[in-house]
Image (cartoon, rainbow, N blue to C red):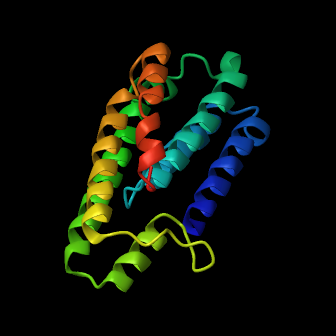
């Protein structure tokens, strides 16, 4: 999404400024890092999964920059507060749940569409084009697939805080869905 690019560039610039331009002013470096973090949090609007991923990328950039300068920035209360207040998984989970809501709304909207409009919507929603379209499918089956994906997305959102072994077990259990549902 091109509108997210300027946010990433601004965050990189602020991290660079904190590292290279604010070497004699730790307070100004913290200002740059806090501003970058706030910028990342604002790219989540409108809430989309990609917006949440860009936010997480920006937050990682801020954390890495602060870690590289830990001796110089250690103990700054604004930086400590910034990192203590963060809950990145909750934000990402909201993005995934929002995507599940979109899948449900798309499925519901399909009930009143013509078969051609329905297939165009489905192809657009999964990034297919006229040279590589989805196979034609019955309206009832397409709606069922989308509702299944919405349910899967909601379950996935809940797996984010699982231990790695439990997450991998859950993911392996989804293989059947990936083989049968063209949207998975």
> Would residue 125 appear left or right of 148 to someone viewing this image?
right
Instruction: Judge by depth and name the residue closer to the eye, 86 or 106.
Output: 106
Counting every numbered tag in the picture gives 0
> Would residue 31 appear left or right of 42 to someone viewing this image?
right
Q: Could one spot residue 69 in this view of the protein?
A: no
Which quadrant would residue 88 be assigned to in this image?
A: top left
Instruction: Judge by depth and name the residue closer to the eye, 183 or 28.
Output: 183
As drawn, 5 above or below 117: above
Q: Residue at x 38, y 69 (%)?
A: 137
Residue 81: x, y in percent? 42, 26
Q: Residue furthest toward the right?
A: 20
Residue 125: x, y in percent? 44, 67
Q: Residue at x 51, y 27 (%)?
A: 79
Q: Residue at x 41, y 56 (%)?
A: 48
Q: Could one spot residue 70 in this view of the protein?
A: yes
> Would residue 35 appear left or right of 155 to someone viewing this image?
right
As drawn, 118 above or below 31: below
Residue 24: x, y in percent? 75, 32
Q: Residue at x 38, y 61 (%)?
A: 46
As drawn, 96 above or below 113: above
Q: Quadrant of the N terminus?
A: bottom right
Residue 159: x, y in percent? 37, 28
């Amino acid at each position: 999404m091109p509108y997210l690019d300027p946010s990433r560039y601004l965050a990189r610039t602020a991290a660079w400024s904190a590292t290279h331009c604010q070497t004699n002013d730790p307070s100004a470096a913290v200002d740059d890092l806090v501003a970058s973090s706030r910028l990342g949090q604002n790219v989540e609007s409108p809430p989309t999964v990609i917006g949440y991923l860009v936010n997480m990328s920006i937050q990682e950039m801020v954390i890495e920059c602060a870690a590289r300068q830990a001796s110089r920035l250690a103990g700054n209360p604004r930086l400590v507060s910034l990192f203590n207040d963060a809950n990145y998984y909750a934000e990402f989970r909201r993005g995934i749940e929002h995507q599940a809501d979109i899948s449900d709304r798309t499925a519901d909207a399909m009930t009143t569409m013509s078969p051609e409009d329905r297939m165009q919507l489905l192809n657009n929603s999964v990034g297919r084009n006229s040279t590589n379209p989805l196979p034609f499918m019955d309206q009832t089956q397409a709606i069922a697939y989308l509702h299944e994906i919405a349910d899967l997305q909601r379950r996935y959102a809940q797996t984010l805080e699982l231990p790695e072994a439990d997450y991998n077990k859950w993911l392996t259990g989804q293989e059947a869905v990936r083989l049968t549902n063209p949207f998975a």
